[in-house]
Image: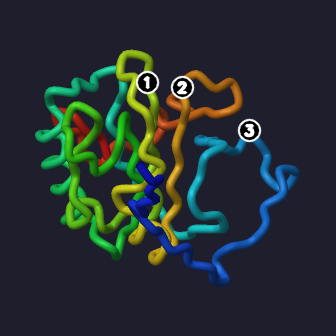
Amino acid sequence: KKDEFSLLQIKPMTINSFNREIIDNDIKNDLLFCKSDIVLGNGKIEGIQNIIFIDPKTFHAEKTPEIAKEIEFYNKKLGSKKPYILAGPGRWGSADPWLGIPVTWKQISGASAIIEMGIKDFPVDPSFGSHFFQNVTSMRLGYFTIDNNSKDESFDYNWLKKQKVVKNKKFTIC
């Protein structure tokens, strides 16, 4: 039988003035609350004052549809006028709620940066933003993937815990 080649997906990359080279020496590690080797987008995003966070310590995969509803609540409150960082375990936008938070773009449209976090008891391969790739690239969002097994990647839970909590719902904190 003859070999066959099938094209599954093409993802355009948006290149504009947002992209710039970032030199490691320009960034002081002690000022970072999140560091990843796998990031879509680069540059500077200003004006972020809120973080919507799903704590990996209280995360339960069977509750992901409920978590998505809570995120939708925050997204409606904050909207695009108050951009935020969205951070939590698993894949964002997964159709399978056992792989991550099954949000739609409408539920997270106010996010300026999204952080996908690997956690010990939830060994899911990251999506690298594939569920929202067109939105991530065309809207110049930051998309971070944190590998919990990496010594070079990190998320500073201690810094986050020191921040003012605006709203604390059952599964999410803002």
> Which amino acid lies under the numbered mark 1 shown in the image of this protein?
Ile
Q: Residue at 39% of width from left, 60% of height from top?
A: 8
Most foreground residue, 49 or 17? 17
View extreme (top): residue: 121
Tag 2, which secondary structure? loop
Q: Earlier in the sequence, mark 3 or mark 2?
A: 3
Q: CA distance from mark 3 to mark 2?
A: 19 Å
Residue 163 location in percent, x, y?
46, 41
Q: Say which mark, if any, is on residue 30.
A: 3
Tag 3, which secondary structure? helix
Query: Quadrant of residue 169 in the image?
Result: top left
Residue 18 location in percent, x, y?
64, 77
Q: Residue at 28% of width from left, 51% of height from top?
A: 93
> Which amino acid lies under the numbered mark 3 shown in the image of this protein?
Asp
> Which amino acid lies under the numbered mark 2 shown in the image of this protein?
Asn
Query: Quadrant of residue 149 in the image?
Result: top right
View extreme (front): residue: 1
Q: Earlier in the sequence, mark 1 or mark 3?
A: 3
**Label 2 sits on residue:** 148
Residue 100 location in percent, x, y?
29, 38
Instruction: Answer whether labels 2 and 1 touch (C-beta < 8 Å).
Output: yes
**Label 1 sits on residue:** 119
Q: Nearer the viewer, mark 1 or mark 3?
A: 1
Q: Nearer the viewer, mark 3 or mark 2?
A: 2
Most foreground residue, 60 or 123? 123
Tag 1, which secondary structure? loop
